[in-house]
Image (spheres, coloured by chain):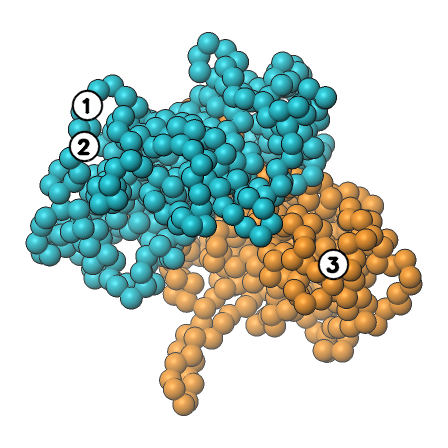
């Protein structure tokens, strides 16, 4: 790729993108907010990794850190590294990092209206993205913008390319964002709640588009969301986050059919299901998610958990394998969770 | 649009209940589009609600579902006369709300309340919870005793000592509980719930849904539940009305609607909702609609959904002409008199598990 960083993406067999033991802390008047506290994950070509969690679980911060969008100060990074095909992103000089961001790794944000600049034409914004990373003429860049708008399914792209963001509907703005993210053929697409602001029929359109683009280009997608329905339909692997940590990790089937962490189990039990006759009552998780400045001692979920015993208190449970196939959970009582889940399913 | 003319628009099960709590007939709300700097001329109408008829029986929940801009919130606000309806009749427990004077309307407001979507925006940040709740009693001229506020907080699951705190000291779920406390304070008959759980996290959402159901049982409340999340609707509603571009396109009892949807839009809507079950999702076929919702100032002729309809594309030309020329009325479908759909070619298609 012209102008892209001199990184050998065909290199040795390392994961395409890897985050290792990442910690992102913020110093505030109320104490240190540990937004991300020791998170590791990786994603490969053509794969969709979902990061699921509620608001304030730290799910967006790791993605923002990858793109260098977390300002320091106030953020500190006590530990961790990010590897693109085995090469450390954080140890690279800033200039080289910047080359990779936007070209090798691109991001789609939740709210396309705030992510697009209202005073520039959509086509010009996409063309700018092309010219930032590729040495091409303005004319060629604009032509590329036109092609991209067509590719993401915007009708009548020749007209749309010269319109402003406010002239686009919500779904079309999100398509324009995707076009911008694809401008430099990235290998990794970080999608932070890409459909949360959209209606379900438009969500279906956008997710179908992302799936198609992934198949055509073999892109790795990191899907950050709170919507377990979206996760079940589109994710290959899932990381469940709670209070800045990954508490369970596995394939979509692992997470939905054999949850081994009490929080995952609680989330699944609390969901109303459109495909089932009405349950007598929903089973909510009690209490509220903790403030990240005051995460409870021991297992951070223990004050809200129905399985809590003394064993949960002494230390934060570490993420350990629960079977031989990569399914991991950080729960002292994963056996009891498994039994409770079986019982609920057979009911 | 003459969809309100079908009196059966929602009266299907009315025989067992002599008088519904809420009866809405042919409700219309148009917003004028004005132009000009000094002399404002009306150059068009946004037909936000265009002939909606429905009823809600005592102690029941009817859900109004649809996508943004379909007019569901406008319908709810026009029913409460928070927005003045352009035309139509609204009766609450037999009382014609649409004809009330301002004074009488204020008195009637005791019986009809609303819980808003965003608990961050709907509570005054400068007032304590006690002030927010007391204001209600003062405005509507009702008696308060010493224990009123603490009883109210207790009912919605908040501790009494929270009464003197400010809204910013609460989490989203707690704020929504305060919004609910404010709505039930005057012991109303009917409450509009305008997306009450959409802004909440999944684990908190279930707490609020359970609270709403408990209150309905204890206080005999009647709900109109506005939502776009069909999973919550399937759980909470007794009856569901689907809106598209200002009109009801299908209305049926809950299980009937989800298991036997007849309108192509309802089918597309249900099929688009992802279900948290990976194996099921792998075999489900999703109906992906083309394009966006048309401009409600200039809706398509005939059937309003035809420009995005997947079934329209499969029809022959003479059949298509009917969709273009003739607005479909809400007719009984599936051989049931409490299930109506507004489609010339309505037919069953299973979409939840297929």
Query: Callout 1: few (<14), some (14-19), or many (20+) C-alpha neighbours within 10 Å?
Result: few
Asked whether the beta carbons under mark 2 and mark 1 sit within 8 Å of each other, the answer is yes
Question: Is B176 or B13 nearer to us in this picture?
Answer: B176
Q: In this view, does A21 lie to the left or right of A105?
A: right
Q: In the displayed structure, would residue B114 be above or below residue B346?
A: below
Which mark is drawn over residue B161?
A: none
* Disc 2 packing (10 Å; few <14; some 14–19; many ≥20): few
Q: Which residue does the numbered mark 2 point to in the structure image? A: A7
The lab-note entry on whether marks 2 and 1 share a chain reads yes
Q: Is residue B60 above or below residue B72?
A: above
Q: What element carries label 2?
A: loop
Mark 3 surroundings within 10 Å by alpha-carbon count, few (fewer than 14), some (14 through 19), many (20 or more): some
Q: Can residue A67 be seen in this view?
A: yes
Tag shown at residue B165: 3
Give coordinates of residue A294: x percent, y percent.
62, 41
Task: Give the color of chain B as drawn.
Answer: orange
Q: In which quarter of the image is residue B118?
A: bottom right
Are the numbered discs 3 and 1 placed on the same chain, yes or no? Answer: no
Residue depicted at 68% across the width and 67% down the height? B126
Chain that is cyan in the image:
A
Report the residue at 56% width, 62% height from top. B74
Q: Name the residue under label 1.
A: A11
Residue lying at 91% horizontally and 61% vertically, measured from the top left: B146
Does A64 sit above or below residue A14? below
């Amino acid at each position: 790729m012209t102008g892209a960083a001199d990184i050998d993406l065909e290199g040795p067999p390392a994961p395409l993108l890897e985050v290792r033991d990442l910690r992102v802390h913020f110093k505030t008047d109320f104490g240190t907010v540990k937004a991300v506290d020791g998170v590791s994950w990786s994603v490969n070509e053509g794969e969709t990794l979902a990061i699921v969690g509620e608001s304030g679980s730290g799910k967006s911060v790791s993605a923002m850190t990858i793109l260098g969008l977390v300002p320091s100060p106030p953020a500190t990074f006590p530990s961790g590294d990010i590897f693109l095909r085995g090469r450390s992103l954080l140890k690279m000089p800033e200039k080289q990092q910047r080359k990779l961001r936007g070209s090798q790794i691109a991001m789609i944000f939740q709210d396309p209206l705030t992510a697009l600049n209202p005073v520039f034409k959509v086509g010009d914004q996409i063309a700018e993205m092309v010219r930032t990373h590729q040495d091409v003429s303005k004319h060629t860049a604009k032509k590329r913008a036109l092609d991209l708008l067509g590719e993401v399914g915007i009708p009548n792209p020749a007209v749309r390319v010269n319109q402003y963001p406010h002239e686009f509907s919500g779904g079309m703005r999100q398509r324009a964002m995707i076009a911008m993210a694809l401008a430099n053929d990235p290998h990794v697409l970080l999608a932070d709640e890409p459909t949360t602001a959209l209606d379900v029929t438009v969500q279906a359109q956008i997710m179908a588009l992302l799936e198609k683009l992934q198949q055509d280009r073999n892109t790795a997608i990191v899907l950050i969301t709170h919507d377990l329905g979206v996760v079940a339909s589109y994710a290959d692997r899932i990381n469940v986050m709670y209070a800045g940590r990954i508490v369970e990790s596995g394939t979509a089937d692992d997470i939905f059919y054999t949850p081994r962490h009490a929080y995952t189990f609680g989330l699944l039990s609390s969901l109303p299901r459109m495909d089932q006759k009405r349950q007598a009552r929903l089973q909510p998780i009690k209490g509220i998610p903790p403030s990240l400045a005051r995460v409870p001692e021991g297992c951070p979920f223990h004050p809200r958990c129905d399985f809590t015993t003394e064993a949960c208190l002494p230390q934060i449970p570490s993420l350990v394998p629960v079977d031989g196939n990569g399914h991991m959970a950080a729960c002292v009582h994963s056996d009891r969770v498994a039994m409770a889940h079986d019982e609920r399913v057979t009911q | 649009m003459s969809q309100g003319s079908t009196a059966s628009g929602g009266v299907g099960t009315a025989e067992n209940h002599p008088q519904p709590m809420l009866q809405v007939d042919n409700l219309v709300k148009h917003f004028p589009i004005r132009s000009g700097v000094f002399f404002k001329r009306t150059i068009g109408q946004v037909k936000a609600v265009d002939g909606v008829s429905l009823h809600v029986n005592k102690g029941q929940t009817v859900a109004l579902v649809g996508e943004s801009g379909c007019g569901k919130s406008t319908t709810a606000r026009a029913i409460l006369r928070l927005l003045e309806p352009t035309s139509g009749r609204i009766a609450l427990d037999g009382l014609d709300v649409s004809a009330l004077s301002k004074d009488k309307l204020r008195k009637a407001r005791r019986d009809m309340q609303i819980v808003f979507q965003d608990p961050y925006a709907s509570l005054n940040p400068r007032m304590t919870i006690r002030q927010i709740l007391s204001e209600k009693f003062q405005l509507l001229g009702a008696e308060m005793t010493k224990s009123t506020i603490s009883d109210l907080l207790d009912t919605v699951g908040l501790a009494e000592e929270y009464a003197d705190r400010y809204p910013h000291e609460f989490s989203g779920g707690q704020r929504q509980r305060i919004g609910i406390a404010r709505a039930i304070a005057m012991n109303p008959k009917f409450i509009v719930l305008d997306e009450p759980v959409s802004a909440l996290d999944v684990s908190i959402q279930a707490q609020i849904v359970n609270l709403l159901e408990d209150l309905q049982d204890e206080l005999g409340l009647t709900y109109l539940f506005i939502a776009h999340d069909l999973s919550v609707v399937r759980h909470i509603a007794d009856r569901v009305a689907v809106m598209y571009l200002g009109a009801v396109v299908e209305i049926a009892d809950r299980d009937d609607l989800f298991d036997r949807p007849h309108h192509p839009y309802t089918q597309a809507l249900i099929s688009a909702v992802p279900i948290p079950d990976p194996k099921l999702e792998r075999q489900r076929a999703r109906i992906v609609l083309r394009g966006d919702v048309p401009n409600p100032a200039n809706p398509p002729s005939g059937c309003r959904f035809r420009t995005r309809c997947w079934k329209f594309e499969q029809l022959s030309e003479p059949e298509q002409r009917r969709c273009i020329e003739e607005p479909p009325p809400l007719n009984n479908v599936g051989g049931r008199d409490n299930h109506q759909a507004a489609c010339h070619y309505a037919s069953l298609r299973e979409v939840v598990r297929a």
